Amino acid sequence: MTHGAGESQARQFFAAAYEAFQHAARAAEQSVVCDYLIGGCLVRLRFASPALLPLMTPALAHLAVSSNGREPKLTICLWDSASTRTSAPDPSWLLNGRPLNPGTFAYHDERMRLAFDTVSGALNLLETERRLALYWVRNVRQLPWHETGAPLLTILRWWVGAQGLQAVHAAAVGTPAGGVLIAGRGGVGKSTTALACLDSKLVYISDDHCLLATQPSPCAWSLYNTGKLDAESLRLLPHFSRYIHNAERSREEKALFFLHQHFPEKIVRGFPLRAVVLPRVSGRRETTLRRASPAEGLKALAPSTIFAMTGSLFKLTGVAQTALQTMAELMRQVPCYHLEVGTKLEQIPEVIGQLLDGDRA
Amino acid sequence: MDLSGQFLINKPKVIRETFDDEVVIINLDSGNYYSLDKVGAEIWSLIEQAMTTGEMIEDIACRYEGERLDVEKAVAQFLCELEQENIIAAVTAPQAKAKPGIIPELETHVATGKPHFEAPVLHKFTDMQELLLLDPIHEVDETGWPNPSH
């Protein structure tokens, strides 16, 4: 990575982008501020205009707080060019005037991270020293559906590392006294397993992304109150059909739910972790648990965490090694189990509840 | 076979974690991930201690019951596999040996006799590869794309 005079181009771009946000906020004259408690830290979202509000805030609604005068640990400034009638930040230094290739253009140095996604058109910037992040899109209509279900994931994943947290590709359910992390690659049944527990005494943290801490003891923190089911899983849990947020796009997208809107008492901010479970469809009737090795747990959690969340620079910044170490530490701290999911889905929360009650630990 | 050959783990693109009897390895470039257990995990430990091929063969042959030739062929084949997957790379300059740790298996062997040798297996998983293809990351330096960062 180059430094000195070269590094200033990135700083200049950040400064120009922040100026663009401030100009957009003045132009729109409708700025909105929302505060959230993410991983126990106060995060402030400053919207230049209300256009992005309905797309970026529902998934975070369960974490909304009043700042009570506290200074946020991170401020994220969000705007779009269309509703604010302002011009886009100019990433020409990054692209060097060349045609865009599909994918994410990424830059990082000790203080700053940038990701420009050419597919969604979203620009994510984080300046760690200033505790300031920027999120821009040209038009809110360009936002892909998954951004609404997991808003600002790129920025938050960059930022949480410095807070002693690791964003992981996992679901989590349990009780306020302790819960389980549900790990596995996409399609293995994390969402179905987590959502099947909503109609039980168990509480819910996530179905796909959450935050992991291993010090001083293992715990999971909620990031989004969303749930997602593909068509096949929706057939297994048909009562969720009434909660679908994106029904008009059901052919192209997974069914998306904002669970805080329908189960506010069931969505919690965090709990201690007591075990890791690895779901898989057994084909049998009964749902059972079988002990798994720490290595099996790590294989289920780490690759999808590191590779599935693209645009985060895991590959080349050394963050991947730290992430792997954190996830491995969890596997050494708590037991791991295969959750052999049977056809009677109502057994899932029973089996997990028994595990947490100590019947199987 | 070069018995004096040593190997280094291909950091930083290869990351790994070791548990008591199993190793999990991830190749950040290819998206492949692997696990090693039993004899494979033990050989991995010997690689990390900068042992030569000959020393690894000697160590494994002492700890397991089996034909010496079978051990030699299996260890050589295993090292070749690790190299082909770009997990390790042969080094030309001799590396200083890491201080060997206590090997619990050896203590057990003394007490109960040697276990039968089984060829080491590199368990390979490729289900993450297509995720890398779906959203390629172009990482650039201060001079912009397409100049890659180093």
Image (spheres, helix red, strand yellow):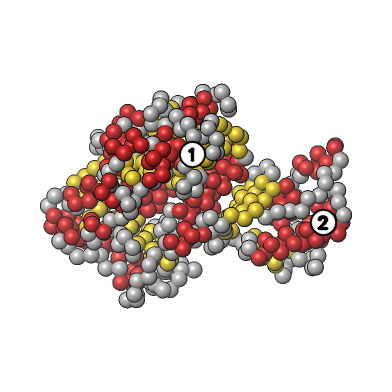
Mark 2 and mark 1 on one chain = no
- The image position of residue A58, as x and y in percent, is 27, 42
Q: Is residue A27 left or right of residue B54?
A: left
User: What amino acid type is highlighted by mark number 2?
Assistant: Val
* SS category of the residue bearing label 1: strand
The residue under the point 27% across, 46% down is A247
Q: Nearer the viewer, residue A5 or A77?
A: A77
The local crowd at label 2, few if under 14, some if 14 to 19, many if 20 or more residues have their Cα within 10 Å, is: many
Q: Are marks 2 and 1 in contact (CB under 8 Å)?
A: no
Among the 4 quarters of the image, the one containing residue B94: bottom right
Asked if residue A220 is positioned above or below residue A354 in the image, the reply reads: below
| Residue named by callout 1 | A182
* SS category of the residue bearing label 2: helix
Q: Is residue A78 left or right of residue A330?
A: left
Q: Chain of mark 1?
A: A
Asked if residue A179 is positioned above or below residue B59 in the image, the reply reads: above
Distance from disc 2 to disc 1, alpha carbons, whole Å, reads 40 Å
| Residue named by callout 2 | B71
Among the 4 quarters of the image, the one containing residue B69: bottom right
- The image position of residue A107, as x and y in percent, is 40, 63
Quadrant of the drawing holding the C terminus of chain A: top right
The residue under the point 51% across, 56% down is B128
Q: Chain of mark 2?
A: B
- The image position of residue A176, as x and y in percent, is 42, 27
The residue under the point 34% across, 41% down is A226
- The image position of residue A308, as x and y in percent, is 45, 53
User: What amino acid type is highlighted by mark number 1?
Assistant: Ile
Q: Taking the image as drawn, is residue A316 in sight? A: yes
Q: Is residue B74 left or right of residue A223?
A: right
